[in-house]
Image (tube, helix red, strand yellow):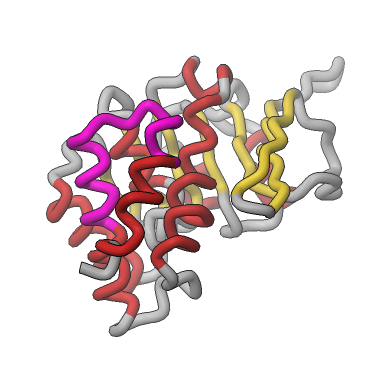
Amino acid sequence: MAFYSSLSYFDTVITKTGINEEQKKKIINYLELLLVHNKKQNLTGITDPKSMIDDIVLDSLTLISCDIEKKFTVINDIGSGAGIPGLLLAIASPEKEVFLVEVREKRIEFLNIAINHLNLLNCKVIPFDFKTVVRKSIVPEGLFTARASLKINDLFYLFNGNSAYKNSVIAYWGIEGTPTIQEPIATFSYTIATKKRTLYFFKKIYTSKN
C-alpha cells in the first residue's frame, strides 16, 4: 500500500474537511487505483503520496467549504481527466449528482473503472467534449467545475447564445491574479502546503442585449 507511510498525515489534514471514515477509505482506494493505472497511461504527474494528498485531494475538496457549492445538487466536471476534482467531489458529496465530462478514450476507461471500483452510484461519465455538451444540453444545469482542463476564458462558452446553462455557475481553480475577460462573482483564496491558490466563481452577466 503506497500510502501506508502517509496515513497519519492524511488523517490529520482530511479531518478538517468533514469527511467520514467510509469516505476516507474511498479516497485512499482512489489514489491507490490512480497510481496503478498511472503506470499504464499518463493520468497524473503527481505520484508522491504526500503531494497527492495535498495537490489532488485537499485542493479538490477545498470547493466543498465554499457556500456557493452548497447551493447546487449537480456538479459537472469539465475535462475530468483522471477524475480530479470530479471523483473526489462525488466521494465527498454522495447526495449530489456528479457528471464527469471527458472525451479521451483512455481517460473514460479509467473513470468508469474507478466509478465501479468505488461504487459511486451518484457519478457518471459523459463521453463528449465541452462544447458539444453545451450545444446539446447533455448534462443538467448545475455547478460546472474545471481544474487545469480548459483555459478560463474558453469556459465562458457555457453562457453563449441559447445555452441552457445561463443560470449555472463555473468554479475554476487558478492562482491569484489569473487574467479573465469577466469579473468573478466570488473568489476563495487558500494555501495548500506552501502553494497559494484561488477558486474563482463566474456566472452569466446579463445586459440589456441579453
In screen coordinates, is 47 left or right of 183? left
Q: Quadrant of residue 162?
A: top right
Q: Nearer the viewer, residue 154 or 34?
A: 34
Quarter occupied by the C terminus: top right
| Residue 51 position in % (x across, y down) | 49, 62
Vertical comparison of 65 with 2: above or below: above
Vertical comparison of 76 with 106: above or below: above
Part of the protein shown in magenta: 13-30
| Residue 107 position in % (x across, y down) | 35, 67
Quarter occupied by the N terminus: bottom left
| Residue 25 position in % (x across, y down) | 20, 46
Q: Is residue 163 at least partly visible in the picture?
A: yes
Which residue reaches farthest bottom? 40
Query: What residue sits 21% from the left and 56% below the top?
Result: 29
Query: What residue sits 44% from the left and 39% below the top?
Result: 76
Name the chief secondary structure element in magenta.
Answer: helix
